[in-house]
Amino acid sequence: MTRRALIAVALFSATAAPVAAQTCPGGTPIAIVECEQQKAGGAPALADPLALARFLRNVADSLNAAGIPGGPFGILVKTGGNQCGGYSCDIICSGQGDAQKQWDVLEDAGGASRPAWEGPLSQIVVRPCEILATPAPTPTPTPTPTPTPAPDLEALIARVTLLESKVSHLLLEAQKIREVVEAETRDIRAIIAALPAAGPLPKYKGRLWGISIISEPCPSC
């Protein structure tokens, strides 16, 4: 193997998450037990008592994460006789005292270690059930809506007043223009009426469209 390949393998090993840290997906309890057995390395790997204890912890954790009815689940404490690291080698439990329930999850634990889900068992020896606490999901906070600012009534009133003033000013200007147009129209009509049928134009002095106009006969024109 080349040096580059060795470095790549080392980086992958350093960054890959351990399989045991992942819970098996929900479904049925037996499917979870089978999944955890495969994750653990199958029956040969479960020949080790400590590996069996880890397997049972992972089963309980996956059952709780999947929300399987009957939980929360844990592993049964057993300090004497046939035990695996201070726990029963094939039992998953829930509850304490008279409310305790137990399930057998392995046939021939440590040997063939065949996945099973038998129970709740009718005849059990009640022992402390070490419940594995699964962290509750962190609730997503409800976003606080941004309040819409209330309209500034004083500013609106001031704006309306200004607009009314401008409209009134425009109306006055329009009225003045109308009066000027009417007056100059009258002047034009008076000029036209005073024109003789023929001959020089009469003398006229006035304003037309705001412009001073002086008209007088021009004999030399």
Image (cartoon, rainbow, N blue to C red):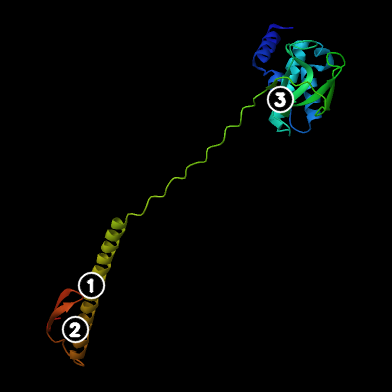
Viewer-nearest of discs 3 and 2: 3
Q: Is residue 9 left or right of residue 82?
A: left
Element carrying mark 1: helix
Q: Is residue 68 above or below residue 181?
A: above
Q: Residue at x 70, y 33 (%)?
A: 67
Kindly identify the amino acid type of the residue bearing the numbered disc 1: Leu
Position in image of residue 113 (x %, y %): 85, 18
Disc assigned to residue 56: none
Which tag, 1 or 3, sits closer to the chain's start?
Answer: 3
For the residues labelled 1 and 2, the Cα–Cα distance comes to: 23 Å
Element carrying mark 2: helix
Q: Quadrant of residue 220?
A: bottom left
Viewer-nearest of discs 1 and 2: 1
Which tag, 1 or 2, sits closer to the chain's start?
Answer: 1
Q: Is residue 38 left or right of residue 192?
A: right
Q: Which image quarter is the N terminus in?
A: top right
Contact (Cβ within 8 Å) of mark 1 with mark 2: no
Q: Which residue is mark 2?
A: 187
Viewer-nearest of discs 1 and 3: 3
Contact (Cβ within 8 Å) of mark 3 with mark 2: no
Q: Which residue is mark 3?
A: 97
Q: Do we see residue 23 in this rendering? A: no
Q: Residue at x 28, y 57 (%)?
A: 154
Q: Is residue 171 above or below residue 138?
A: below
Q: Is residue 203 left or right of residue 120?
A: left
Towards the viewer: 193 or 110: 110
Q: Which residue is mark 1?
A: 172
Position in image of residue 141 (x %, y %): 53, 37
Towards the viewer: 1 or 16: 16
Q: Is residue 152 above or below residue 108?
A: below
Q: Which image quarter is the C terminus in?
A: bottom left
Kindly identify the amino acid type of the residue bearing the numbered disc 3: Gly
